[in-house]
Image: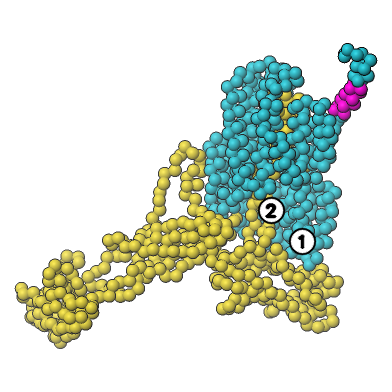
Amino acid sequence: MGIDDSVGDRSNAAVDLNRTASLKKKNAPRFDTRNMQEQARKGSWRLLLENVKEARKIAAVFSPEERIIHTTYHILALAKLGNYTSAAEELAALGDLQNASFFYEDHPDVYPGISGSMVPFSLRWLHAAIPYRIGQASTSMERMYSLLDYCSQKEEKALAADGKSEEIDEIFSSFRLDGGVLDEEQRSNALARRWKRRKEIVNFAIINLHLGQKDYIVALRFVNETLARDPENVELWSKFAHVQLQLGDVDGAKLSFAKVEALVDERAKGGEVDSSLLCLVGRNKGLVAFVEKQYAAAVKAYNAVLEISPGDALAANNKALCLMYSRDLIRATQVLEDVLQKHTEAALNETLVLNLCSMYELAAINSNESKRKLSSWILQVAPDDFDLTCTRL
Amino acid sequence: MTSGAGAAGHSLAFRVMRLCRPSCQVDHPLLVDPSDVCNGEDSVNFKELLPGLVNGNDPGFWKRFELQEPMDAMGLSGQLVLPQTFGSIYLGETFCSYISVGNHTNHDVRDVIIKAELQTERQRIILSDNSKSPIESIRATGRFDFIIEHDIKELGGHTLVCMAVYTDPDGDRKYLPQYFKFTTSNPVSVRTKVRTVKDTTFLEACIENQTKSHLFMDQVRFEPAPPWSVTTLENEEEASESDGPISGYIKSLKLINGNGGARHYLFQLKRPPLESSDVKLEGANALGKLEILWRTTLGETGRLQTQQINGSPTPKKPLDVKMTNLPQRILIERPFLVRMEVTNRSEQFTGPLRVVMSETDDNGTPRTVLMNGLLSLMVPPLAPLASTELEVNLVAVAAGVQRIAGICLVDARDGRQVEFVPPTEVFVEAE
C-alpha cells in the first residue's frame, strides 16, 4: 500500500482488475500446455499457432518456463506449417540458449531451490533440425553433432549428481515413466535416463541427415556404433538391410533380413511375439520378393501383413507398387484409394499420396480430375501439416 | 514423369512411364518426445504430461508429431516411392517402361494392333508387336497395358516408338504413332595399365563412376584370353572387431560414389612358361576383357564388358632362322647335313653368333638327334637385313619318328640365347 492511500487504492484496484483478467486468461484452457499437446496430436497446428500467439500477447502473466514452452510450440507450429524461415527467425531471436535467464536459479522467487536449464530439449533439437529444411544442411549437421556432445555431457552430469533429492522422490511417487512404476533406482536416475534417450534421438537424427545427403558410409558407421551397443535390435538390423538395398547390395540385404527373422524367431521361442514384429518380418519378405521381381510372392507377403494389420500403410503402399510393376495399374490405384478411405489416420502420408498421383498420371489423359478430387478430400481430413505438393497439381 | 498425350482426333492415347526401380523414401520428419516440449530439459516436473504415452495402435495423426521410438527419427520407414523423373539412362542398364494405351472416348474401337519399337542410329528393335493377334476391341474408357524391357547396348540417341492401328466406330482404320526420345551415356570410364615385373604381368584397372549417384560393384572380373590365367589381388584388411558388428562390412563395401568417384582393381596375369619349341606370336598381345557388373538403388542391374585389353606387344624377332633343306633319307647313326638360313631382321649388326644344341629337352630326356662333332658352328656378324646360309652336321641315335629340336643361336660374346630354330620332325630309318 502506498503513502497516498486514495490514489494507491484506485491504482491498485486497476492493477488488480488487470491482473484478474490476465489470470483468468492465463488459466484459459487454450493456454494449458496439455491442450496444446492435444492440438499438436490432432495436427491442428493453425489453431495451436493462434493460441500461442495469444499467449505471447500476455506473456507477463506466465512463468518463465511456461513462456519458453509457448515459444517452443510456436516454433514447432511454424515449422510444421512449412514456414521454416519464420521458425528460424524466431529461434535466432531467442539468442544464446545458455543465457542465465533460461536457468531456474535465475528466478529464485518462482523456482525456489531448483537449478538447471528450463529450455525444453525440443527447442534445442529444432534449432539443429530446421536449417536443413532451408537448404543449410551443413549447419544442421554441425549443430546436431554439438547437440550429441551436449546430451553426453548432461547424461554424465546427471549420473554423477546425487539423485536422491526430495523433489524427485516426491514428484515421481505417482508418475509413470516409460509405462512402468518407478523403483528407487529409476527415480534417482530418471534425469540421466531422459538425457540418454535424448542422445539416442539425436543419434538417429544424425543418421537421417547423412542418409538425406546420401553419405551412406558415414550413416552406416553410426548404425554400426548403435548396433554395437544394442546388437539384438531387430528394428535397427531391418533398417540396416534397407540401407543395403538402397545401395544395391541385394545379397547383403538378404543376409541382414535373415538375421532379423532369426532374432524374431528367438523371441517367439521365449513367448509371444508382438504383432508389430510379425508385420516387420512380413514386410521385409515382401520387399525382398519385390527386389527379385517376384511380384506375386511379394503381394502375398504384403497381404499377410494386411491381414494382421489392415491399416499398415507401408504394406499397402508397397503392395500397390508390386501390382503396378506387374502391369496391374488399376488394382494398384484401388489398393491405395481403399486404404486411404478405410484407414485414413494410419495411411495418410505424403509418399503414399505421391505414389497414387503418379499412378493417376499414368492411368489417364486428364489425370488432373482424379488428383483434384483426391486433393479436396485430403483438405477435409488431413492435419494442418500435410504437404499438398505431393499431389503434383 | 509420365509422357504422352492424346493426338487430336484419335480415340486412343499412349501414356508411358519409365519403370526403373523405386527407392526407399527417406523422410525428414519433425518428431518430438512430448515431454521434451512441455518441460525444461533439466526439469523433473512431469505433471504437465498427458497421462501415459499413446499406444502404438491408437488412431489419430499423433504419429506425425510424437516419436514412438528414438529410431523413428531415422526417417527410413521402408515405404517405396515411385521414380519422380525420367532420370538418366546408361549403357549396360535395362530400360524398362510401362506403356498404357487408353480409350478415353465413349465409343469402342476394334481390331487394335499395338507395336513398340526402339530406334537407334544403327538399328530398329521390336519390343512388342501383336499384329499376329490384334486385340478384338478396347471398349470406351478401357485400356491395354504392357511393360517393355530392353538392355541398352548403344550410346547416343534412342527413340521409343509406340504405334497403334485401330478401327474407329465409323469403320475408318486409324494410325497413331507416338515418339519418346532419350539419350544414353556411359556410366563408367575405365583406364587400364599393364605392367610386367619379371615373369608376371599385372593389370591395374581404374573404374570411374560418371553417373550422378553411387554404384555398387557387384562383381568386377577379368576374363583372360587364353593362354593367360588370372588372379584378382585384393587387399585383405583386418577389421577392428571392437568397432561393431558391421565394421568388416563397411570396410569391404565396394561402393563407388557418383560424379567422379573411382575404385582401383589389380589383377595378376600368368601364362604357362613357353616351351623352347613354341613359336612366339609377334605383334599385339591380347590379355583379355574386363567385365563389370554393378547395381544401383534397390538392385537395379547393369553390365558392361570392355574391349580387348592388350599387353605390351611381343617384340619383333631380331633374327629369323629356318631350316631350308633336309636330306631325303636319314639313317640311324649316319651323320647328315641340314641347311639353315639365318636372316637379320633388325636395324643393327648382329654380333657373332654360335650354333649350339642342348643334349636334353626341357624334361631332361636325352635328345635323339644330336649335333655331330665337337666343333661349334659360328655365324659371322650380319649386316641389317642381310642373311646367310649354314650347314649343320647332325646324327640320329634312335629310329622312327624323331624331332630335330633344341638348336639355338647364342650370342658368342655372352652366351645369351637369341633365337631357337623351329623344331622339325623326321623319319629315321633303322639299319
Chain A: what color?
cyan
How far is disc 1 from disc 2 in space, using C-alphas? 16 Å
Residue at position x 37%, y 67% in the image: B287
Chain B: what color?
yellow
Disc ID at residue B364: none
Looking at the picture, does residue B146 appear above or below residue A378? below
Pointer 2 local density, CA inside 10 Å: few below 14, some 14–19, many at least 20: many
> Which residue range is magenta in the image?
A14-27
Q: Is residue A30 left or right of residue B150?
A: right
Pointer 1 local density, CA inside 10 Å: few below 14, some 14–19, many at least 20: many
Would residue B84 be counted in the magenta stretch? no
- Residue A1 lies in quadrant: top right
Disc 1 designates what residue?
A: A360
Whether residue B58 is visible to the viewer of this picture, yes or no, is: no
Dot 1: chain letter? A
Residue at position x 74%, y 64% in the image: A362
Residue type, mark 2 in image: Asn
Disc 2 designates what residue?
A: A318
Q: Is residue B416 left or right of residue A342?
A: left
- Residue B85 lies in quadrant: bottom right
Which sits in the foreground, A70 or B2? A70
Q: What predominant SS class does the magenta segment belong to? A: helix
Indicate the position of residue B200 as horizontal and vertical percent values. Answer: 31, 61
Looking at the picture, does residue A389 appear above or below residue A162? below
